[in-house]
Image: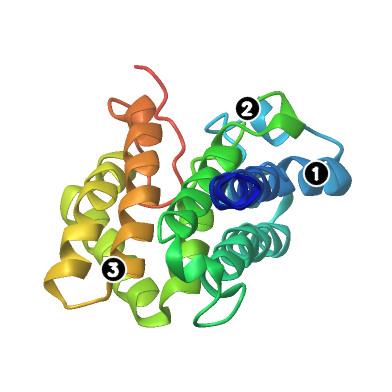
Amino acid sequence: MGGKLNVLLLPLLTTLGFGMLGYLCGSLPFAVWITRLAKGVDVRDAGSGHATTTNTIRQAGFGWGALVLVLDIAKGFLPTWLALHAGGQNGILSYMPWVAPLTAALVVVGHCWPVFAGFRGGMGNASAGGAILAANPLAFVIGLGILVALVLIIRHSARASVLTGLLIAPAFWLLGFGSPVVWVAAATGLVIAFRFTIDWNREYRELWLDREQKQR
């Protein structure tokens, strides 16, 4: 009986543990903290209203924005990499393939709705990119290329992000990437697609610095 209970509890506890790790890492609001430290303002009170790299650049400068970008990518990379590699190639996580996609998705959820910042966060692209980078660096480059191409074609970064979130996993599957990469992309992509619907009808003045146009 005890052995059967352990067999049931171990996957559950492992899943919950990595899921919590992903969400808490994602909830680290670097844009909020760094902009407050650098300029004494809340990054969400101006510009797009989101805790993003572009909003940090707008309010605190390029250097601080670059730091936020690196940290947001890192907080997506680290939990996902641990979920993919903990225990070695034949470790327990190799028998629980859902753990890495779940962890990656919850990183992005934490970034968008962070418990440490009143559930008002960013949009999740950088953290999702970090998770995909942990799964496969080439997939990260291709995914970034898809996003940039769609932004240039559609000329609307929110709609391009929604489409990228929906298309990236099928694209990776067609390109022959393995299941871990496809499922991490699918899990993070769905969160990204949902998150960016909030800005679907937003008017943009620039291709990548998402400032609102003034109402005429």
Scheme of colours in the image:
rainbow
**Based on the displayed image, in which of its 4 quarters is residue 203 positioned?**
top left
- 77 vs 155: above or below: below
The residue at 26%/54% (across/down) is 151
Question: What residue is disc 3 on?
Answer: 179
Question: What residue is disc 2 on?
Answer: 120
Q: How far is mark 1 from mark 2, CA to CA?
A: 13 Å
Element on which disc 1 rests? helix
Element on which disc 2 rests? loop
Residue toward you, 133 or 81: 81
Residue toward you, 95 or 2: 2
Q: Pick whichever of labels 1 and 3 is earlier in the sequence.
A: 1
The residue at 28%/64% (across/down) is 182
Tell me if mark 3 has few (under 14), some (14-19) or many (20+) residues whose alpha carbon lies within 10 angstroms of its own: some
Residue 30 located left or right of residue 109: right
Tell me if mark 2 has few (under 14), some (14-19) or many (20+) residues whose alpha carbon lies within 10 angstroms of its own: many
Q: From the top left corner, tell me how far across and down residue 153 is, in percent.
A: 16, 55
The residue at 69%/55% (across/down) is 61
Q: Amino acid at mark 1?
A: Trp
Quarter of the image with the N terminus in it: top right
Residue toward you, 76 or 84: 84
Tell me if mark 1 has few (under 14), some (14-19) or many (20+) residues whose alpha carbon lies within 10 angstroms of its own: some
Q: Which mark is residue 33?
A: 1
Q: Amino acid at mark 2?
A: Arg
Residues tagged 2 and 3 counted as in contact (Cβ below 8 A)? no
